[in-house]
Every structure is written in C-alpha cells, then in structure tokens.
Amino acid sequence: MKSEADISIALPEPAAWSGESPARPVSLAEARQYCESLARTHYENFPVATFLLPRRLRPHFYAVYAYCRWADDLGDETGDRSRALALLNRWEEELRACYQGQARHPVFVALRETIEQCEIPPEPFRDLLTAFRMDQTKTRYPTWAEVLEYCRYSANPVGRLVLCVGGHRDPELDRLSDFTCTALQLANFWQDVRRDFEIGRIYIPLETMARHGYSEDDLRACRYDERFRNLLRELVERTRDWFERGLPLAARVDRRLAMDIELFSRGGMEVLRRIERQNYNVLARRPALDSDAKALLLASVVARRLFSRQSEPQPRRGPL
C-alpha cells in the first residue's frame, strides 16, 4: 500500500487544485490514511481531541475534518475570489458524486464510507460550503442576526456532523450543539478581531460598534480605549451566554464523545476569560491557550467526566 506521501505527490494542495481527480483510483485504506495525515498535520488541537474518541470513530472524524479543511482552503488560500468560488462549486460537484457512489478524490473516498456508516445527510456539508462562499462575497455584518446567520452555516453544521458520527440524532441535541458551535465561532471572531480586519473582514455587528461609538476607522487605527473595552465586554458576555446554553449537551451524549465536546466548550470559555484578563485588548495581543493551559484543561475535563461516572448510582445486585 502506498503511503500518504505517495498520494500527495499526485494530488496538489487545495490552493493549486484545478478540480482534477488523482491519476489512478484511490483505495479506501489510502484515502483514510490521507485524511488522518491531513488532520494531524494541519490542526494542532485535532489529535489531542481525537485520542479521547473511540478508535472506531476516529477515521470518520478524520474524513469529516479533511472535507472541511479542503473546502476552507479552497476558499481562503487561492487568493482570487472568482477562482475560489469556482473551486467551491467544483468541490460541491465532488460531494454530489460522493453521494451517488462515484467518489474519486481521496477525501470523498473516505467520506463515502463515513456517510454510509453514519447515515449523514448532505445538508451539513452543503451548509459549510455556503459559509465559505459567504466569505468570498460578504465582509461586513450590519446586525447580530446576520452574524448568527453566518454561524448557522459556518459552525453549526460541524456540530451536527459530530453528533451524526457519534450516532446521535435528536432535535434537542442539535439545538444544544448549535449553541455550542455558534459560541465557539463567536469566541474565535473576538480573539481574531485584528487578524480578520487585516484580511478585510469585520465580524463584529456594525450596529453594535455604532452603539458604542466605535468606527471602522477606529479599528483601522487599532484604537484601544473605553469604547472598545465596552464593545468587547458586550460581545464576550453575549458569547458566554451561548456557551452556557450549550453546556448540557455533554451530559446527554456518549461519555467519550462528551469529553471531546466539553473540551472544546471549556476551551472556548477559557478564551473568553483570557480576553477579560487582558482587559479586552485583543488589538495588541491575540488571546490564545498555550500548551500548559490546554493540558490543564484536558486533565480537568477527563477528571470531571471520570468522577461523574463514578458518582452515578450503580445498579443493585441480587443476592449471590
């Protein structure tokens, strides 16, 4: 069997992709290996999270991640809006072919197995593509409703996919997951205010900026003052409320999956605390979790879940 490195020689990076399939058919084993390698080399938090998952589910998470990674890169790494939109349309064609049993790209060869075994509908995958297209056509969000609409496409489908892979199909769990995923997306926006502005995007609702008397010119000048602190304080408080609404989700899913969900929720809430600790000055320094903080967070989540399991009432035994 060829290695992932051998596959990558025949398959360009997303930014250089022109919609072609590999020169030869890719086996399921090769496709799985490709997706795992992509996940492990492109997202530092992903391997930490996946070791908590049951081993049988890991290939499915790798496949889902690879789909998201490729689609995101097709949108953000090409450097040309019209080409990015064309490639996203081509990616959706590959998705359609995958659902018709005609997968060719290694990501979709692996994803086909995941879709079949986990019975995943196409809507979450399509919704993500809607978000990536929005990134190419919309750079300002006048209202909170529009920001939340973006999160509906950019973040919430990821949670729905996680629940599907974990075998959970329940509208109430979907609702709780949406709270969590929206909160994670918002926390990422607030920690990346400066970085996003530098690439031409503002995710802070313009109506909220205006209410605090803070303008786009102020943001361009990186003016950190009382207006900006009050603005970020409101954003952080609102985002924390979304996290708290979603916290019950972890108690209602499989224990191993629950640790992953809680890890990301607690991590997002810790980002908010760090924004507060630096007095909301995300313009001077991006608040992020270092390796020690991640390790401590992981240990606390594992300990909490193990303790809660030990505290559960045990079934009564009959007489020996």
Image (cartoon, grey):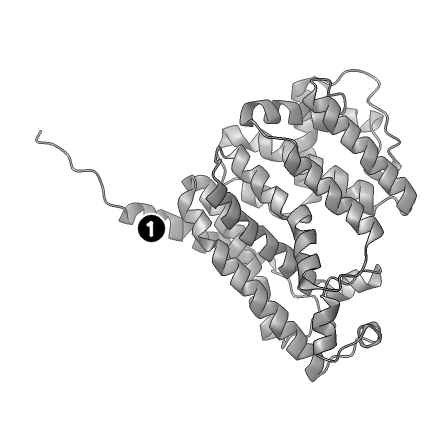
Depth order, front residue of 171/198: 171
Residue found at the far left of this picture = 319
Give coordinates of residue 289: x percent, y percent: 60, 60
Lateral position of residue 189 relative to residue 244, left or right:
right
Within 10 angstroms of label 1, few (less than 14), some, or many (20 or more) residues? few
Res 218 quadrant in image: bottom right
Image: 200 above or below 132: below
Q: Residue at position x 15%, y 34% from top?
A: 317
Number of marks in picture:
1
- Disc 1 target residue: 307
Q: Residue at position x 70%, y 81% from top?
A: 227
Q: Residue at position x 74%, y 75% from top?
A: 210
Image: 67 above or below 226: above
Res 20 quadrant in image: top right
Give coordinates of residue 36: x percent, y percent: 65, 33
Q: Secondary structure at mark 1?
A: helix
Depth order, front residue of 179/12: 179
Residue found at the far bottom of this picture = 226
Give the amino acid at mark 1: Phe
Give coordinates of residue 61: x percent, y percent: 59, 35
Depth order, front residue of 303/64: 64
Q: Residue at position x 60%, y 68% from top?
A: 236
Give coordinates of residue 265: x percent, y percent: 53, 54
Image: 258 above or below 223: above
- Pick the quarter of the image with the N terminus: top right
- Pick the quarter of the image with the C terminus: top left
Kindly tell me whether residue 284 is visible in this rendering: no
Kindly tell me whether residue 96 is visible in this rendering: yes
